[in-house]
Amino acid sequence: MSKAFTREGDEAPDEVDAASIESGPALPAGTKNYITPEGFKKLQDELKHLVKNERPKVVETVAWAAGNGDRSENGDYIYGKKRLREIDGRIRFLGKRLEIAEVVNPAAQKNRDQVFFGATVTYALGGGARHTITIVGVDEADADQGRVSWISPIAKALLKARAGDTVELRNPRGAESVAVVAIAYPGK
């Protein structure tokens, strides 16, 4: 069979969309990428691990698999190339995010009676249900851990509020009253 009719080359059958690899939480245009020192270190550590450990292992596997002959039906080669594209996309994404990051240390916050980046806030909804969240950077947000992005609706509603204040949270269900119960910052 002529090579014109066969699939040759490095592309895997399930081509990975570069945008999906690199996409992380979106930042609003013109805003800074605020992040805590812990979050910044975590991103740096992930980047370092990908560059120094994971990528070299995958490159080694791909090189070994490429030496085994027919690449079109070589699962190790096909998966390895796909994984390599995913790793390279994540490396690019992390590099860009770290480049634009602005590290804000919540422990250094002087005005501790108001809600700012890094604050841990306990608030009560209109029905009396209490919730505690920590306002962090977009790359650190984890709702299961009570860590919300500073650009989330609840964080935006709470910013600059003081304990005892009632703020209005706008969400898809409409406006809701939120009472600030307590504000805490790490350290000191």
Image (tube, helix red, strand yellow):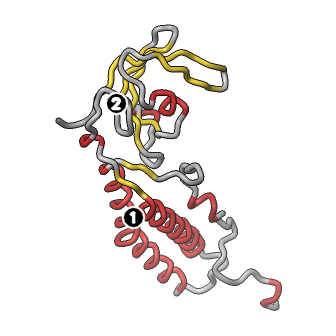
Mark carried by residue 175: none
Q: Quadrant of residue 21?
A: bottom right
**Residue found at x 56% / y 70%:** 85
Provide the residue designation for mark 2.
Answer: 120
User: What amino acid does circle 2 point to?
Assistant: Thr
Where does residue 95 sit, x and y in percent of width and height?
45, 66
Where does residue 161 sit, x and y in percent of width and height?
42, 25
| Image quadrant in which the C terminus is located | top left
Q: Nearer the viewer, mark 1 or mark 2?
A: 2
**Residue found at x 40% / y 19%:** 180
User: Is residue 15 or residue 42 the one in the foreground?
Assistant: 42
Provide the residue designation for mark 1.
Answer: 47
Real-space Cα separation, disc 1 to disc 2, in angstroms: 28 Å
Question: Are dots 1 and 2 in contact, CB under 8 Å?
Answer: no
**Residue found at x 67% / y 83%:** 9
User: Is residue 15 or residue 143 the one in the foreground?
Assistant: 143
User: Is residue 89 or residue 30 the one in the foreground?
Assistant: 30
User: Is residue 148 or residue 45 the one in the foreground?
Assistant: 148
Disc 1 or 2, which lies upstream in sequence? 1
